[in-house]
Image (cartoon, rainbow, N blue to C red):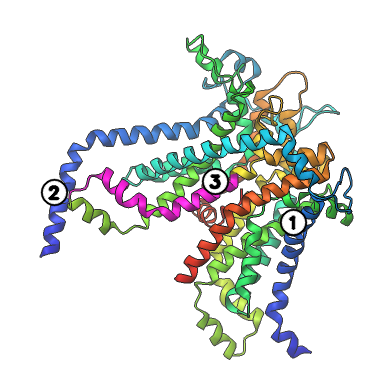
Amino acid sequence: MQDSLKSSSYQQLEQKSKYTNMFLRWFLYFILILFASYFIFPLYVMVVTSLKTMEEIRQGTLLSWPSGLNLDSWAVAWGGRGYGAGDTFLRPYFWNSIKMVVPAVFFSTFIGAMTGYVLTKWRFKGDQWVFLFLLFGCFIPFQAILLPMARTLGVLGISNSVVGLVLVHTVYGIPFTTLFFRNYYVSVPTELVKAARIDGAGFFKIFFKILLPISAPIIVVTVIWQFTQIWNDFLFGSTFSFGEAAPIQVALNNMVLSSTSVKEYNVDMASAIIAGIPTLIVYVLAGKYFIRGLTSGAVKG
Amino acid sequence: MFKWLEKNLPKIVMAPAVGLIGWFVYGFVLWTLYISFTNSKILPKYELWGVGQYVKLWGSRKWLIAVDNLLIFTALFLIFCIVIGIILAIFLDQKIRAEGLLRTIYLYPMALSFIVTGTAWKWILNPTLGIQKMFRDWGFENFTFDWLVDREMAIYTIVIAGVWQSAGFVMALFLAGLRSVEDEIVKAAKIDGASLFTVYWKILLPMMRPVFFTSFVILVHISIKSYDLIVALTQGGPGISTTMPALYMTQTAFHKSQVGLSAASAMMMFMAVAAVIIPYLYSELRRENAR
């Protein structure tokens, strides 16, 4: 009785505030749309600029609509102009990034799944400390490891190569992948594992038969996180790899900075979109998982 | 033998991860620490030299500018990201139409690299053809917006781009926090006559203290490490006016070949991050153990 009274008076209150707050409501939408335009503005400018000719860019403003669907600057950004020296374009570096991302994501995810599995289901004395030991790796500023890493890659003979970058990204991805899998497996009932052990199932059998089949969501989160981080990385790419083995972000930066005669903003924008589109597609298709990774692993800069 | 292997299999599986992190994180940080106490130039030298590099570092005008910029950037970046993030989160929490679409728009910059972001903003902010020209063409003939090439103001362009990239993320954190609060609390307060403003200001926001804390730590962490954005937007210029510690470190190491000095600057960054992260980890672990 008391409850229904309360909820009806609440509804009245809601009703009343609905009218009095009409104005507030419009204000709300106004602000939200204002911010939405601030966020969408650079993307819009990038897209329209990439479709304009330099002549149109000089005559129009940032916002002006392109005269037509002119994909020339996209072609130049992707495949170059066809003359020899100084003709930088993104295609080879795009493939470098793919060759770097795929193995690095695979290895770091696999290792993270294994360590997460041991840390939650095969607990041993001091495992909390081992977790903390790994977790701290999420936080270090990479400047503190750049110098020795450069030397190590040199000694191993893999500096300035895609293989070197795969190693770097795998290693510094482990703390994050471990964190993701550990936090996911913690909520899986340990009884399941215990029962399987009594039935004689071994370490790997339990992993592949019990945990792996229910790991799809966390694998997606981890793969998306690692893919985005590694694809977007610039610090490691620019420090350990230059010239032909450079990943796409480094190539983009070089392209934009190279000051050959006239600045071609349309080509710059097309290049920037090409470098950003893979992660953008992943974000649009799997936003939910992207955000989940972000909120649990965003300690990385 | 086989028995031993089976018994220790979990530890054997753990070994690669622990070994790699031990070597590549802890070992490398210690190496950098050691080198920062030597007089290494192009190649590392291993005789100890004392704290000379740190003295040199804090006597360097460029480093002081870098630290100054870091403080300015961090303060503004924090304030704007958190204020915008909270406003967007609270507004989105009002049973808004098209919430999903708006959320997607606010957060998409997080999916882009700082190099892409920097390239776009560099084009938008450039005085000859960017925003300045747009306003002038619209009839505001004296409109001037040339922060990108102004020594005094260039650092604020990095703030604009940085906030654009990260504010949506703070929004996501706060929205998740607000959604986890029981509806009953809000309803009860409203029945007691509290206005919506009071509900948020007096009840909900104080409950968001952990979210504030998390956002603070993450944003400070991002700002101490910020490197890509500066490279893409200003390369530390005009002159050295937008240098930040991360940029100082790589330039000193790889362009000036002052390995010892750059190791010292890296250790300063490491300590700054540790000063923020260790209390955070400590409190997180306590919270987890209390559960």
Residue carrying label 2? A12
Q: Secondary structure at mark 1?
A: helix
Q: Quadrant of the N terminus of chain A?
A: bottom left
The kind of residue tagged 3 is Leu
Circle 3: element type: helix
Q: Is residue B2 above or below residue B48?
A: below
Give the chain of mark 3: B
Crowd around label 2: few <14 · some 14–19 · many ≥20 (10 Å):
few
Residue B262, image x and y in percent? 77, 43
Q: Nearer the viewer, mark 1 or mark 2?
A: 1
- Foreground residue among A13 and B267: B267
Q: Position of residue B153 (x, y in %)?
A: 59, 24
Residue under pointer 1 = B29
Q: Dot 3, how many residues are within 10 Å of its Cα: few (below 14), some (14-19), or many (20+)?
A: many
Q: Is residue B77 left or right of residue A208?
A: left
In the rendered image of this protein, does residue A247 appear above or below residue B209? above
Image check: B256 left or right of A17? Answer: right
| Mark closer to the chain start, 1 or 3 | 1
Residue type at the position of mark 1 = Val
Question: B3 or B146: which is nearer to us?
Answer: B146
Q: Amino acid at mark 2?
A: Gln
Please tell me how crowded label 1 is: few (under 14), some (14-19), or many (20+) other residues with Cα within 10 Å.
Answer: many
Residue B60 placement: quadrant: top right
Q: Which residue is mark 3?
A: B219
Residue at 57%, 68% in the rendered image: A182
Taking the spot 53% from the left edge, 72% from the top edge, the residue there is A186
Q: Nearer the viewer, mark 1 or mark 3?
A: 1
Residue closer to the observer: A127 or A67: A127
Answer whether residue A33 is visible to the viewer in this image. Answer: yes
Residue B194 among those drawn in magenta = yes
Residue at x 78%, y 22% (from the top left corner): A260
The verdict on a common chain for dots 1 and 2 is no
